[in-house]
Image: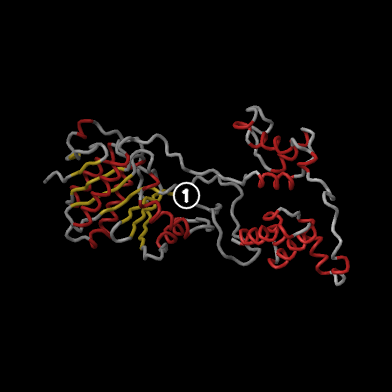
Amino acid sequence: MEEAAIKKRFNLLKPFLDERLRRILAATEASALGYGGVSLVARTIGVSRRAITSAQKELRDPHFTDNAQRIRKKGGGRKRSTDKDPSLVKDIEYLVEPVTRGDPESPLRWTCKSVRKISDELKNMGHKASYNLVAELLRQLDYSLQSNKKTLEGASHPDRDAQFEHINQTVIDFQSRHQPVISVDTKKKELIGEYKNSGREWRPKGDPEQVQVHDFGKKRVAPYGVYDLTQNSGWVSVGIDHDTATFAVESIRRWWCLMGQACYPKAVKLLIIADGGGSNGYRIKLWKLELQKLADEIGLSISVCHLPPGTSKWNKIEHRLFSFITQNWRGKPLVSHEVVVNLIAATTNKKGLKIQCQLDTNAYPKGQKISDKVMATLNIQRHPFHGEWNYTVCPKNM
């Protein structure tokens, strides 16, 4: 915002400024901004830092006006590097974008393209270019520092949008009938111990939390979350064993017994929104077997709608529950199971999110095989639209 205002003022006055007044104007703007002003003004209007600092000294000189009429001859002064070396810009673009503008065998094809490395390679090519000059020229060429951006979701299923519409309509139908709707997923596994946890928090200056140099710990936990879309509340089971379908359904069972049943005393059915993969994936036989056991136990028909392939980040639990848990424990080493449980349970947000959390110390062995004969005994009703993604598990006594 400040840069745009400075640039606008400078462009309006530019026709009336000679070289000296342009330098003085830049120095005045920089002085008014205070710390960091020289760099900002230099970047915005193209006057060098050296010229601005020199003009600031002139402004502080009581005899400044004595030579106010002296200006340099037109065309005088040091020539720009790009004027003395016309091929410099072209070679910078060659190094920065070797695939689109140059040779795939560019010297920097397989290295980090920092301004210092570009400067070193330009020197090898016969140019005189400091890393500061390289940074300035890159900005003039509309380059900026960029990080990776997660936008590629893989191949999109042709019925992706139709499945989202189906899920949305099913959620609306359940909520209008005052039936529970939950979103479920496993949060990423977390290391337990004195290990670095991303993020920062306020502490006394010069007294950061001390953690291990290497993250080679073997002790991990798998938080499995259940988010109630209607109540804006959540349940998290912190598992210490494998993330299996049995663990996933046990987490849903605990949510129902300790939270859901009290909120929905007249419920006759339950809707679960889940990813298409992981421990609650639509191809997992154990997931459906455990849901059958749960349906028989609590007497509810359990409908499941899976998100289409490649869309796990659209799961409501990701940005309505897990994101706030991550914010709450940022910068805090997860030194014990108790710390993990307490930090999750203390998580809230401005909309009144409430979470209950419990440590699950049960063992959940991997590799359980479910035969087709057992699957044939399940009371599963496939929905007309994509029955592999959308189905209802009914109690066997219904």
Which residue is found at the position 70% from the left and 46% from the top?
135
Position in image of residue 190 (x %, y %): 47, 49
Q: Position of residue 149 (x, y in %)?
A: 51, 44
**In which quadrant of the rendered image does the N terminus lie?**
bottom right
Q: Nearer the viewer, residue 33 or 276?
A: 33
Across and down, in percent, residue 305 comes to 27, 44
State which quadrant residue 372 falls in.
Answer: top left
Q: Residue at x 70, y 68 (%)?
A: 32
Count of labels in the image: 1
Report which residue position mark 1 lands on.
190
Residue furthest front as drawn:
16
Query: Residue 71 in the image: x percent, y percent?
Result: 84, 58
In the foreground, 295 or 52: 52
Quick check: 43 left or right of 163?
right
Farthest residue, direction bottom: 62
Q: Nearer the viewer, residue 358 or 232?
A: 232
The way the protein has been coloured in the rendering is: secondary structure
Relative to 285, 58 lies left or right: right
Q: What is the three-letter code of the residue carrying label 1?
A: Glu
Residue at x 71% of width, y 35% of height = 91
- In this view, the residue in front, 63 or 11, is 11
Left or right: 190 in relation to 384: right
Within-10-Å neighbours for mark 1: few <14, some 14–19, many 20+: some
The secondary structure type at the circle numbered 1 is strand
**Left or right of 68 on screen, residue 154:** left
Give the image quarter of residue 207.
Answer: bottom right
**Is residue 313 shown above or below 333?**
above
